[in-house]
Amino acid sequence: MTDETRLFSDRESLCRDAAHELLRILADAVRDRGAASAVLTGGGTGTGILAALSDLVSAGPGVPADLRMPDWSRVHLWWGDERFLPAGDHDRNEQQAEEALLQELVTLHGMPAANIHRMPAADSSAGAGTVPLETQVTQVMESIMTAAEAYASELAAHARVDGGPDGRLPVFDVVMLGVGPDAHVASLFPGLPGPLTRGATVIAVEDSPKPPPRRLSLTVEALNTAERLWFVVAGADKAEAVAEVRHARDDETTDAARWPASVVSGRDATVWWLDGAAAGLG
Ligand SMILES: O=C1O[C@H](COP(=O)(O)O)[C@@H](O)[C@H](O)[C@H]1O
């Protein structure tokens, strides 16, 4: 397993290079295996990579010579986490991805809408229903649990799965993860049960310290079977978390509950995509 750092002067150049590399990996996987998968992340850098990808996809003849486009009908997209809000809410990670890239892939580049595996929304049939006021607390609780179960079933039915003894964990070509200033990844937050949860691929989070409070997230187990896991991080507000997490990764006594990003890795490669500010260089 390789552990690598790629350093950029700013977020824009980071996003451009990550988009370029992502396209290459997806195209190679489609060529070699007939299918490819990527897990998307929300946040400024995650969405910036999708916008940069959109620039490459729509560049036509202007596309860099060494770049091959994947057959988009063979590419599947998933999410590492989602804000449990009504569909179309701009704070949903999928909505930001939709605007940055997905609409274009479906309407112009032949990606079947069914290849976009969105996490359930708070008003989707898997996620909620009409709830009588007196039972609302219990029902809301049940609906986010139902949503987590629905996404776990979607993974089991449509993701490539681990060939190991377990046989239930999804294997993605690339998982992208932003890292919060508190060292959270996906919606696995320090001090909550998420980073320590085992035996599930998807969890419901009901008290996220970062708004909105209700979220869905892949678990550490579901992330750690990725072939390549990318941390995509920009901005000085992340420098301390990045330094602490990287230090914790070298320490066997790491407290996963304190530094969630320190306990996720790719099977083949873990790559830190950092701008200078996030790397603590100014
Ligand atoms: O809430 C979230 O935050 C992280 C990091 O976002 P950033 O804007 O600080 O880069 C993001 O990766 C995650 O998907 C999202 O739900």
Image: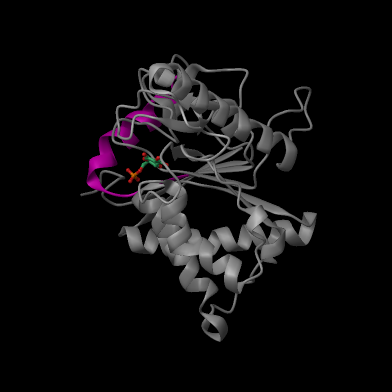
Residue furthest toward the top? 253
Residue furthest toward the left? 282
Tell which quarter ligand 1 is in. Answer: top left
Residue 87 seen by the camera:
yes
Q: Quadrant of the N terminus?
A: top right
Question: What's drawn in magenta, residue-wise?
Answer: 231-251
- Magenta highlight: main SS: helix
Q: Nearer the viewer, residue 81 or 137?
A: 137
Q: Quadrant of residue 254?
A: top left
Reply yes or no: does residue 243 show up in magenta. Answer: yes
Q: Quadrant of residue 106?
A: bottom right
Residue furthest toward the bottom? 61
Q: Nearer the viewer, residue 132 or 137?
A: 132
Which residue is rendered at x = 40% and y = 24% of the image?
A: 248
Expressed as whole percent of the image width and height from the top left, the position of residue 68 reads: 64, 71
Expressed as whole percent of the image width and height from the top left, the position of residue 122 reads: 46, 37
Q: Quadrant of residue 186?
A: top left
Q: Is residue 24 left or right of residue 250?
A: right
